Amino acid sequence: MSATVIDGKALAQEVRAEWKGRAERLKKAGMQPGLAVIIVGSNPASSIYVRNKARASREIGIYSEIHEFGENSSQEEVIQRIRELNGNPAIHGILVQLPLPPHFESTRVIESIAIEKDADGFHLYNVGALVAGNTVFPPCTPYGVMKMLEKYAIKVEGQHAVVVGRSNIVGKPMALMLLQKGATITICTSRTRELAEHTARADILVVAVGKPHMITANMVKPGATVIDVGINRLPDGRLAGDVDFESVKERAGYITPVPGGVGPMTITMLLCNTIEAAERQQAVRTQL
Ligand code: GUN
């Protein structure tokens, strides 16, 4: 039997429709949510992501600014701009598109973002809050995955979740968020020995490694939920996930496609975090 394909595009539209009203209410109250996106250098994938984030922001009623810096800019210059944005009342969310050029220390740059404007959830304070089971701004990609599981009523509590990938952006926060919902967690990396033995025990399998088609049907438990976070460009120009969709969909219970799965949810959750940030900052101001 073929798996149910999780429609990330439709779900993203549904979540955006739910949040649009909140953005409108803020605007009526004189506080349009504002997002500043910082990009350094000219990584083509990053440029596309940043443009997409700005467009999605406009569509939902968020004011957005893109701050572009050349490849050879200094870290101090970028941090100085972040400090200005921290103090700018029209901006409620700030994100620094990663990766930064090699001469940057990403952690230092991200640490300069005001905690209450950290819409990506990458500031160490927010990472610590996530570890403590107390998220402030959940990182957007795993937040989008949790939203997918919730919307498709896929049980997490008591289930065995296997996360393949240990990045700070996806793998680690994903595992923590599943753990918080009561799953039993295994975290694997691309170098895990006997990877298939681990993945085949997963009720929920999340893959974020960046290796096209690395998860094949024999590595998946029948009926499992398979979430593919990978986006890989094949030599012929097509996009492919980390999961061999065609074979795995015949074995899984639920599966996300690439494109049209996790990707649209990531940007959506950034919009949600920005609106949430504006609501919190409005609440603080009305108390003053
Ligand atoms: N680079 C790849 N994914 C992301 C993301 O979610 N946020 C930022 N800031 N950079 C990224």
Image: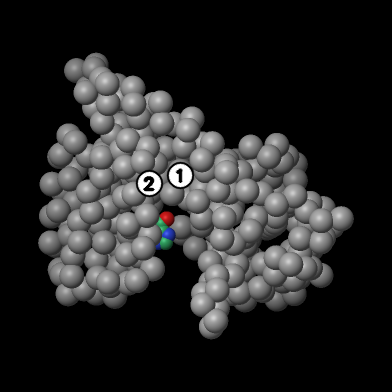
Q: Nearer the viewer, residue 218 or 47?
A: 47
Secondary structure, mark 1, is helix
Looking at the rendered structure, the number of numbered marks drawn on it comes to 2
Q: Mark 2 belongs to which amino acid?
A: Ala
Labelled pair 2, 1 in contact (Cβ < 8 Å): yes
What label does residue 79 carry, if any?
Answer: none
Residue at figure coordinates x 61%, y 43% from the top left: 148
Q: Mark 1 belongs to which amino acid?
A: Thr
Side (left or right) of 214 relative to 78: right
Circle 2 packing at 10 Å, graded few (<14), some (14-19), many (20+), is some
Give whichever of discs 2 and 1 has the lower sequence position: 2
> Is residue 182 in sight in this rendering?
no
What label does residue 56 carry, if any?
Answer: 2
Residue at figure coordinates x 38%, y 32% from the top left: 276
What label does residue 268 carry, if any?
Answer: 1
Side (left or right) of 237 relative to 224: left
Q: Nearer the viewer, residue 155 or 62?
A: 62
Residue at figure coordinates x 70%, y 48% from the top left: 184
Horizontal and vertical percent position of residue 110: 29, 55
Horizontal and vertical percent position of residue 7: 63, 48
Q: Quadrant of the C terminus?
A: top left
